[in-house]
Amino acid sequence: MEYVYDGTFDGLLCCVFRAFERRENPDEVHPCMPAQLSMLGEPVRVQTDATRARRVEAGIVRAAGVQALSHVRDAVFSCNPHAGRDALRYVRLVFRYGPAVHDLLTDDTLLRVRETSQRLWTETNRLREFLRFRELENGVFIAEMTPDNDVTELLMPHFADRFGDMPFVLHDRGRQKAGVWDTHTWVLASSERMQLPPMHAREARYQEMWKTFYDAVAIRERNNPRLRRRFMPQKYWRDLPEMQERAVFR
Amino acid sequence: MDIWEKLAILSDAAKYDAACTSSGVSRRGAGGLGNAVSCGICHSFAADGRCIALLKVLMSNACVGDCRYCQSRRSADGPRATFAPEELAELTISFYRRNYIEGLFLSSAIVRSPDYTMELMIDALARLRHAHGFRGYIHAKAIPGASPALVERLGLLADRLSVNIELPSEASLRRLAPHKTKASILAPMAQIRDRAVQGERELALYRGAPRFAPAGQSTQMIVGASPETDAQILRLTQGLYRKYRLRRVFYSAYIPVGDARALPVKAPPLLREHRLYQADWLLRFYGFTAEEILDGAEPMLDPRLDPKCAWALRHPERFPVDVNRAPLEEILRIPGVGVRTARRIVSARREAPLTFEGLKKLGVVIRRAQFFAACAGGVQPGLRAGREAVCSQLTAACRVPGLTGGEQLSLFDQRPQLLLGGI
């Protein structure tokens, strides 16, 4: 049996509710209808209900604290196709062991849940580092990315706090999803029909100055491209000005 | 001169400063520009694999000093530049808004006098903090010889201050940095320490007390330009951590950019620098003392083995450590077990006794730990190796990842002949 929920945290919590209520043990829990159905037949659509979600939420926190809840929440943003199923199994452990669940460090379900969380937050932190903003003609800044996990929502609080006075858009190309900060609140929106004004006249100059700095701080005698690749994986390079060609003008 | 050109000159001149961390202070954004994250954020990695967190520049490279290891020394050729305070502040803001950097690292050559230099730096930082309302990270160098009143003002603007100790002994300082003395370096260090203690006391009294260098102070020394041994360097480091409450000591493998006649021209001692950093971590996080890492017999760290493995091999009487019973401090001493893993071991063993299989899941590097740890089922089966065999297996397991080029591993490393007293 498989579950499908609406991709929200509340939706996932309602899957937990149903699994406990009906004593079901779904083989997969999908955040949206899978393109290809498995041999197990049509998945069950689980209705999202905020009251039920709050009950489950309170139960998890009571049993094992907010850390347990955040492991469950991470499954919603993860690109791991089994994240939902693992989260459900993890909640079983939470209710069985209580706070001691955090000590089950050699349990395979917990290891998988922890790895899912770790991958998600590693990518989030990498993007805190490697996201690059460009200034548009109208004074708005835009940063584009192609992350594996759905990290826009996780990145917005950090950048909204950091750039309090600077309107910006965070664009996930793959998911066509945008986080928008207008200096007061941030919202998530679809970017399907987003149209960008041209770049600000001074943008190219700052990018070139950044490249100049980047080249100058490297110590030639210590050149070590392998070390650089380990810390700064190549998949991020396409959005890093310093990893693009240098303009000849100056 | 155009700011672009200045940036090229003054970042090139700043690149030998090792420190580029943005850690140690947490500050919310407050609706304006900038915040600080206590774990620090690196924004890029240069071609040498070093992290770039801060816009690392000199205020000026027009130095009156003539330190022989330094490329900004008066007698060196090359273009000279000085930032105008406002142009540096604007550049920092523009880079920060693009998420290129976490903030500014501002150092300087000595222009005219230490006091004049510090006033220029303070001007730039004050514009950044006040006119631009910048709440990001600032690391500033205190210039040795500047007046205490200026160090005070600098510390109220910056998150971290540092004074470079430059060379590990006074004799080497005298020889290579004739304008600097042990006293002129240690005086601001002590001032920063005492002021930070005072600041903490004030903060306990009232919340709005101005914060003086909340991310503490650090220092750096050049390794390989002078004849001090690793043992001397580590004892000095330990003294700095204990007496001056430093957050970090950085080591920088000497690269011959200075006056080549005064200094040996060799490939930078990168492996030595790497081993020193490993030993530094043992001092700060693993409860080791400098005297334990290198006891009197050996003046240099073993290039073939990391210092923790080397210590463990010298102390067979302390092993194997039973991971199911030993206290955290002893588990931290097992090679192949890091700080996080050690905590996980202590946590996981509450639920069930640990096996080698379990240790692997917790993140223990079994290749190294197997010789030193005992589990529920005793020691790893088939491991009754003598010291030599263990040593050669560990050597293979301790190969330095990512470290290519630089000096070759040499078992017959030439030792410096002179032993000079540390600072």
Image (tube, helix red, strand yellow):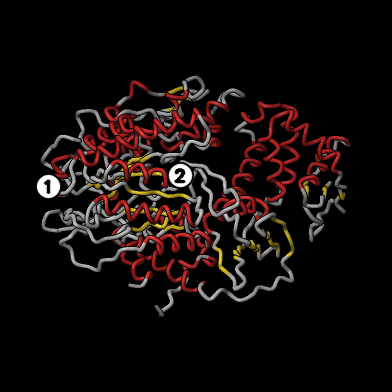
Mark 2 neighbour class, 10 Å CA radius: few under 14, some 14 to 19, many 20 or more = many
Q: Which residue is drawn at 43% across and 38% down?
A: B367
Q: Which of marks 2 and 1 is nearer the N terminus?
A: 2
Tell me if residue B43 comes above or below residue B344 in the rendering. below
Instruction: Identify residue for label 1.
Output: B175
- Amino acid type indicated by mark 1: Arg
Residue placed under numbered mark 2 in the picture: B23
The quarter of the image holding the N terminus of chain B is bottom left
Q: What element carries label 2?
A: loop
Q: Which of A135 and B362 is in front in this view?
A: A135
Q: What residue type is labelled 2?
A: Ser
Residue depicted at x 52% and y 55% = A129
Q: Is residue B387 visible?
A: no
Label 1 marks which chain's residue?
A: B
Marks 2 and 1 on same chain: yes
Quarter of the image containing the C terminus of chain B? top left
Residue B171 falls in which quadrant of the image? top left
Residue B326 visible, this orientation: yes
Q: Is mark 1 on a helix, strand or loop?
A: helix
Query: Quick check: B324 above or below A128?
Result: above
Residue B302 higher or lower than B267, as above or below: above
Q: How many labels does the image show?
A: 2
Residue depicted at x 21% and y 44%: B167
| Badge 1: residue crowd in 10 Å (few <14, some 14–19, many ≥20) | few
Task: Work out whether residue B234 or residue B339 is closer to the camera in this orientation and state it.
Answer: B234
Disc on res. B58: none
Image position, residue B100 (x, y; %)? 48, 60
Residue A13 lies, with reference to residue A221, above or below; the image says above
Q: Is residue B120 left or right of residue A41?
A: left
Q: Where is residue A184 in the image (x, y as percent from the top left)?
A: 68, 55
Q: Is residue B370 left or right of residue A83?
A: left
**Image coordinates for residue B239, horizontal then vertical, percent:** 28, 31
